[in-house]
Image (tube, rainbow, N blue to C red):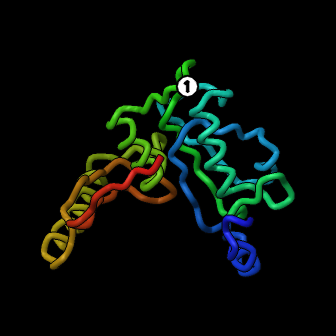
Amino acid sequence: MATFPHLKSLWDISLGDPSICIAVLDGLVDLSHPCFDKANLARLPTLVTGAADRGSASQHGTHVTSIIFGQHDSPVLGIAPHCRGLIVPVFAGESDGDLIPCSQIDLARAIERVVAGLEKKSRVLNETEKKIVAYHEVGHALVGALMTGSGQVEKISIVPRGMAALGYTLQLPNNFRPKIAF
């Protein structure tokens, strides 16, 4: 608390909102840690498999996640304990303590899952629906291309994802430079 002198005043205003979802892309997280009791956390499946252990990747993932979602009746007081959380493991650990990052394609898939939602394999589009969704998404891309200051289209998908999306168009700002913090 001494490191963040204004944190207490922020907690007086809000402890987070359950309608806000925060994704943590890090190592595996030990969800049995007492600070996560009553936390609304879900782990998305990635190619980083297994359970959290005492390795450096799991320790880092658990630490970062506890700073955000630690419940206030626990040893770690998080900054947004009432928000929903998605845990997306993108690092594994070696026995010597080294971190093993996932591949770029696996990282892109993990980000897509967070942004667009899980693929709805149960929702199969027929050929007519695929054509309608494709035209719709291309319309988003064309309007975006005609708008000044709009970023380039990175991806168009007609794969149903999330609660209601039958497809999506992903545009990134022109000056987008991903920032990765460790």
Who's the residue at 28% across and 58% down the image?
177
Outermost residue on the front side: it is: 2
Q: Using residue 134 as the reference point, say whether residue 75 is left or right of it.
A: right
In the image, residue 42 above or below residue 89? below
Outermost residue on the top side: it is: 95
In the image, residue 6 above or below residue 30? below
Residue nearest the viewer, comparing 150 with 1: 1
Who's the residue at 43% across and 55% down the image?
115
Count up the numbered dots.
Answer: 1
Residue at image mark 1: 97
Q: Using residue 38 as the reference point, say whether residue 67 is left or right of it.
A: left
Who's the residue at 55% across and 41% down the image?
44
On the image, the x and y values in percent for residue 158 come to 31, 51
Residue nearest the viewer, comparing 32 with 146: 32
Residue nearest the viewer, comparing 70 with 128: 70
On the image, the x and y values in percent for residue 62 come to 65, 42
Who's the residue at 60% across and 40% down the image?
60
In the image, residue 97 above or below residue 152? above
On the image, the x and y values in percent for residue 103 come to 36, 32
In the image, residue 98 above or below residue 34? above
Judged from the image, the secondary structure of the residue bearing numbered disc 1 is loop
Outermost residue on the left side: it is: 146
Outermost residue on the right side: it is: 73
On the image, the x and y values in percent for residue 112 come to 39, 49
The amino acid type, in three-letter code, at marker 1 is Gly
Residue nearest the viewer, comparing 78 with 109: 78
Q: Using residue 26 as the reference point, say whether residue 161 is left or right of it.
A: left
Q: Using residue 60 as the reference point, say whether residue 9 is left or right of it.
A: right
